[in-house]
Image: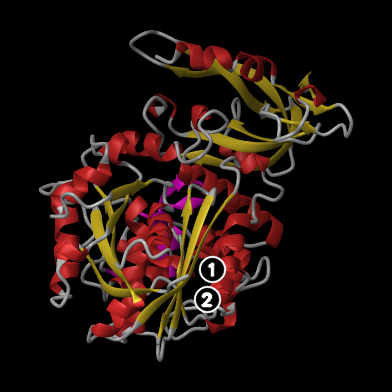
Amino acid sequence: MEIARHWRQRAARYRLQGQRHRETGEVRFPAQPPAIGEDPAVWEAVELSGRGELYSFSVLRQGPDGYEGLVPYPVGMVRLEEGPLVAAQLTDCAEADLAIGQSVEMVTRQLLDTGEDNVLVYGYKFRPVLV
Amino acid sequence: MRPSYIVSAAATAVGEHYARSLSDLASEAVRSAFAALPEVSPERVGALFVANAMGEALASQGQLGAYLANAVGLRGVPAFRVEAAGASGGVALHQAAQAIATGQCDLVVVLGAEKVTDRLEGALEAALALHTDAEAEAIHGLTLTSQWALLMRRYMHEYNYGLEAFAPFPVNAHANAAKNPQALYRFAINADKYRKAGMVASPLNMLDCSTVADGAACVILAAESLARELPGPLIRLAGTAVATDTPSLGARRNPLDLEAARASAHVALGRAHLGLSNVQVFELSDPHGIAATLALESIGSYDRGEAPRHAADGAIAPTGRTPLATAGGYKARGDIVGASGVYQVVELVRQLRGEAGPTQVADARVGLAQTLGGLGATAATAVIVAE
């Protein structure tokens, strides 16, 4: 279900598209509606590099419905090069490979299989940078 | 603004009440509260505020204002359902106090009720995850617990703590719950058991995670003139305040700073004309040691990075400087989600009346209750004073 909901998110999920303030240069992700009284055009769409540092991480052993097949799975928060702090799953790593401050990069992976109507939801995850 | 007085407070035992429904639990809490107040007829109730966060997702029932008004014997009374995730109870209490303050009502009932155990764990985790930012976080499989875990790991990194530094919080909660007949977990644990507990969302282990359970709690508020006619001790709801923050951790200036927790505590204390140093007993959102830590530091009880050290020195015990979770807290009394804020007030009233038995804080006159929605997107604080 919710096909349109997932479709609306395509720019953020597939391209890590956020917003940059044309005057201050501030970058934010995900995109937000303009503030009261703010010219909406002051925020331009910007595709983020997908590179950043691990701010924190956890490995879940009790997942929500829809994610039970993944358990246990690592999640983290990543401080992107451009500034935003993003929450996502981590992939291609074991818990012992992870440390706060390490370099990570975005990859596109399947987030969820909605089951009955076969919507495969794809989006960003992060993995340790391959040296 | 007219002050509000808490003239009765009662709750059901917290538990996995498989044989009981949401209506059944709500009814018991309200009947118990009125049974302790024989001087006041329920016909005088001017409004009902229902705190509930999970009704649609886990109890298959909506329109909970009217539904529970009917169930508890208040049919016809104006009823308002308040939903602010885990802060629902605190926000409902705030709204009820407003109804008295404006002169609209002289007698108001606040009812917190949750029925969560009809569904399995996966549905519960999915429903709780909606208390964060669903698009930014829940779709990535992040649960509420895992987000507290992210904050805990970051806190350990920034302030150089090991896992065991958080053990004093659940150890204190369980020690107190062991003496509370209404608590979910009436047994003690120790630091050794904490160290050996299996992980739920690393570094949060099973003994550092609350259990979400069923229950209902009821608080009856009255205007001053009515409260003064009654025989019991005068317990005044001296100040309440609600503040909000972004639900998304990543969008906060410093994720370890719960800005709404600080703002709501500051405003509620200001409205009560009291300072933090006047508070002798605390009820906070403490499903995990890290949650209690961040709340204590954000409201200003301890400097950044210091709360676990003080907890280890006994500061959160009933005999300490900031007694916490005297009925067991979220960890051991049980986490009743939207009803938690009302359970908190039931405990503070016991403390301020000197009826808390083995976990009584000596000469407690001022208590502070704070509930958080999600990871502090909503924070509701109440300051309660024994006159």
Q: What residue type is disc 2 on?
A: Ala
Give the camera-side residue of B219 and A81: B219
Q: What residue type is disc 1 on?
A: Ala
Identity of the residue furthest to the top in this view: A118
The residue located at (13%, 51%) in the rendering is B24
Displayed quadrant of residue A89 = top right
Residue at the spot of label 2: B272
How far apart are labels 1 and 2 at the CA level?
6 Å
Identity of the residue furthest to the bottom in this view: B363
x, y percent for residue B268: 54, 68
Displayed quadrant of residue B101 = bottom left
Q: How many other residues sit within 10 Å of disc 2, few (<14), some (14-19) or many (≥20)? A: some
Displayed quadrant of residue A131 = top right
Eyeballing the image, is B154 above or below B107? above
Check if residue B191 falls in the magenta segment.
yes
Q: In the figure, is residue A56 to the left or right of B56?
A: right
x, y percent for residue B237: 41, 73
The residue located at (41%, 54%) in the rendering is B209
Q: Which residues are magenta?
A: B187-211
Q: How many other residues sit within 10 Å of disc 1, few (<14), some (14-19) or many (≥20)? A: many
Q: Are marks 1 and 2 in contact (CB under 8 Å)?
A: yes
x, y percent for residue B329: 38, 65
Give the camera-side residue of B120 and A9: A9
Disc 1 with disc 2 on a shared chain: yes
